[in-house]
Image (cartoon, grey):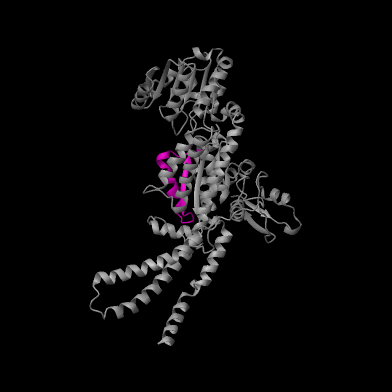
Amino acid sequence: NDPVNLSVEPSNTSVKEIRRLTKIDHRYFVLIYTVPVKMKFTTATILSSILSTAVAFSPNSLATNSVASRNGSNGMMRPMVASQDIEANAAPANGQRKRTKEERLQLASKGLQVHVIGLSIHHASVDVREKLAVPEALWNEASSDICSTGAVSEAAVLSTCNRFEVYFAAPSAREAVARVTEYLAQRGGMPVSVLRKNIFMLSGEDAVWHLMRVSGGLDSLVVGEGQILSQVKQCHLHSIEEDGSGGKVLSRMLNNGVAAGKRVRSETAISKGSVSISSAAVELSEMMCQKDLNLPFGEARLAVVGAGKMTRLLITHLASRGLEKITIVNRSMQRPQELAEQFPDVEVEIKLMDDLWNVVGRSDIVYTAAFSDGYIVDKTKLQENGLAGGRPMMIVDIGVPRNVSPDSNEIENCVAYNVDDLKAVVAKNTAMRQKEMIEAETLLREETDSFCNWRESLAAIPTINQLQEKADIVRKEELNKCTRKLSQNANLSDKEMEAVERLSRGIVNKLLHGPMSHLRSSENSTDQQNAIKELSAMFRLEDEDGDRRGGKKGRSRKR
């Protein structure tokens, strides 16, 4: 928020020069537009203005998502705004009640755009990612906070070891991006200038494509890993809970993402023989054991801190390598006991956190996979517990936030690794899966197109509603005329009159079925907009009152 004095001649200043003057990171694309000379900006104002005018992409995001951003050979972006009838200033107050299903559908039809802002292991280091990490139990609270100002209509948070992403939908990209960026900066306790160097931002079809790749395991550190699919599924389930913030558009997109992930794994070999973060940690420790500890991996004494999903996967992969004994350190006994029951062939010793340093002192390799607000292991604690200068030890930290401080490597006999050190281990896995990745991307494009087509079909909802309302008004007017005449016949019962009512509804519904189906089935937004214009003109939907007056005049002339 330090003031930046910008005094340039826009027409004679190159983009490179403006980037230098405004200290914009050279890794980002920005859309530069003319501004009055000798104006005073803050860095926050410049960033907000840029984000509102154009979406910034990091190089990795562009390389990963460039294929999906094109529709056919013409290379044109497919528009994601379903309708130009957008109420940009409709901002609910804080604490607004949860919208009903009908209200969400109406809002979705007015042109909500989908976006994603976040950071992952591809863009940000673990020390940045851990500042934004949110436990799953608090995902809905975070998404509700994002939507609290009204700038964002729908939101869902996905926070894992390797990524923190906010998927959201809003009628105004400018206000929504500013709100999410503000939230991330506040939560991470970092200035926007630091945040923007680590985050990626995608909109429209690019955002949808990114979600499909994430769910399919193609954007994971370990290609094809299955844990991310269950995490995306939980993201969807949380978004549709009573306190969730996922509406018509976002919940549909997340659900399509889950379906896409399942399809990729069932129709390709992307997940066969793949490894998870846990198995990559096992492979790393096995690969470095002889070098760091001067000890064969099979002879190393093993321990793990934590007893969650990551620990279960760790033990699974260790058992496949002949593990016979391991010590689990946890805050409570319940989960370690459940793990011991799941692995009857492995001798599991259970210790509470009070015995942590005794366990660390007698172990050769310690895996940490616990959720903690601070470091469990650091240089000072190792020294205080007499573990400095002794026999060699290896610590593999796969927790986010990190369980082990980087200064632990300053201890002479200690070697500490974290999730960022696993990249070299999984590079071989990625190279072996190029064929499966190509097949998977073909399927994911189909799922992306499916959602985008559905999203565009929402533009037809206002026209369909208008058409139904006008047809029903005409039906009622004509039925009332007919009813007055029929009521003079005492032989018609109430049931027979109801049959006439049902007959009129049936005729109208059948006549409208064709036009409404045509609107919904338009292959692209251009065809749909043309169909909407034709039907609006044909049925005079833009001038319904005038049409009704004209109808009444016609009846008067007839009489």
Going by the picture, which residue comes out furthest to the right?
A: 12
The residues colored magenta run: 131-159
| Horizontal arrangement in the rendering, residue 436 relative to residue 238 (left or right) | right
Measured along the vertical axis of the image, is residue 273 above or below residue 519?
A: above
Going by the picture, which residue comes out furthest to the front?
A: 491
Name which residue lies at 61% across and 33% down: 434
Name which residue lies at 67% across and 60% down: 35
Considering depth in this image, is 349 or 478 the residue closer to the camera?
478
Considering depth in this image, is 91 or 312 the residue closer to the camera?
312
Q: Position of residue 15 (x, y in %)?
A: 72, 52
Question: Quarter-wise, where is residue 39 in the image?
Answer: bottom right
User: Can residue 40 be seen from the camera position used here?
Assistant: yes
Q: Position of residue 215 (x, y in %)?
A: 50, 40
Q: Quadrant of the C terminus?
A: bottom left
Measured along the vertical axis of the image, is residue 390 above or below residue 261?
A: above
User: Can residue 118 be seen from the camera position used here?
Assistant: no
Q: Position of residue 284 (x, y in %)?
A: 55, 22
Q: Position of residue 372 (x, y in %)?
A: 44, 32
On whether residue 9 falls in the magenta region, the answer is no
